[in-house]
Amino acid sequence: VKAAVFASGTGSNFQALLESESLAADIVLLVCDRPGAMVIEKAKAYGIPVFVADRKMFADKAAFELDILRQLQLHKVEWIFLAGYMRLIGNTLLNAFPSRIVNIHPSLLPAFPGKDAIAQALQAGVKVTGVTVHYIDAGMDTGPIIAQEAVSVETGDSLSELTERIHQVEHRLYPKTINHLLVQH
Ligand code: GRF
C-alpha cells in the first residue's frame, strides 16, 4: 500500500514510521506545507520524495489541496498519514481519500484538541493524558478514534519531560496502529 505522510515540523513521527520494521505501507511521498521545516531534511536523508506546498501561493484552500492531490495521484498514494501537520484538511482531500486519512494527536481525545495539547493537559492538572490515533474529518481532531494509549502525568513533570514520554508512545503506537488498520483493508 502506498502512503504519503503530511507534516509541518520536526518529523519525529515521520522518522519513526520510516524506521519501523515491517511497516505495512510504503511511504512514497512527504507533503510539507512549511518551506524550511526540519522534516524536509529528514525525508531527503531517507531518500523520500518531498512535495512542498506553500498555502500562501494559492488563492484558496481548494486550489492548494488540488495541487497536493495531483502529486498524490502521480505517486499513486492510497493512504495519508498526518504527523504533525498543522492545518485542517479540506473537502478536496477528504473527498478524494474517504476514511483513508489518519492523524496522531498527543492527548486522549476528545480532551485537549488543537494546538499545544500537552501543555493544555499540564495546565489542566490531569493525572493521565496520552496519545490518540484517529481518522480525520472536517473538524479539529474530531474524527473516529482508532487507538489510544494512556501516559501518566508525574508530579513535577516539566513540559519537556512529559512531551518526551508522549513522543515515545507516539513513535510506537503510530506504526503499530497503521499495521492493524491496513490488514483490515
Ligand atoms: C506530535 O506530537 C503529534 O502527535 C502532533 O504533532 C507532533 C508532531 O511531532 N500532531 P513530530 O513532528 O512528529 O516530531
Image (cartoon, rainbow, N blue to C red):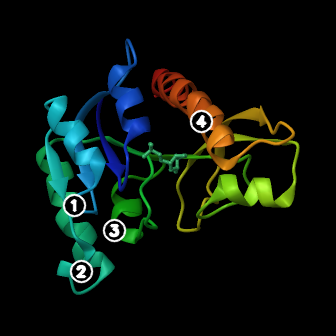
Q: Closer to the observer: label 3 or label 2? A: 2
Residue type highlighted by circle 3: Thr
Q: Is residue 48 left or right of residue 162?
A: left
Residue type for callout 4: Glu
Q: Nearer the viewer, mark 3 or mark 4?
A: 4
**Which comes before the other along the chain, label 1 or label 2?**
2
Numbered disc 2: secondary structure: helix
Q: Residue 117 location in percent, x, y? A: 66, 56
Instruction: Provide the residue designation for mark 4.
Output: 164
* Residue 108 pos. (x, y %): 74, 46
Q: Amino acid at mark 1?
A: Ile
Depth check, mark 1 against mark 3: the one in front is: 1
Observer-side mark, 1 or 2, equals 2
Mark 3 vs mark 2, CA separation in Å: 17 Å
Relative to 18, 137 lies left or right: right
Asked where in the image residue 133 lies, by quadrant, the reply is top right
Image position of 174 (left or right of 75): right
Image quadrant in which you'd find residue 91 = bottom left
Determine the CA span between mark 2 and mark 4.
Answer: 32 Å
> Which residue position is annotated with label 1?
68
**Mark with earlier residue (3, 4):** 3
Q: Which residue is mark 3?
A: 92
Determine whether the residue tagged by mark 4 lies in a helix, strand or loop.
helix
Ligand 1 contact, mark 2 (Cβ < 8 Å)? no
Q: Which residue is mark 2?
A: 56
Q: Amino acid at mark 2?
A: Lys
Q: CA distance from mark 1 to mark 4?
A: 31 Å
Secondary structure found at label 1: helix
Residue 110 percent location from the top left of the image: 75, 56
Q: Residue at x 76, y 34 (%)?
A: 150
Mark 1–mark 2 Cα distance, whole angstroms, equals 14 Å
Front residue of 102/57: it is 57
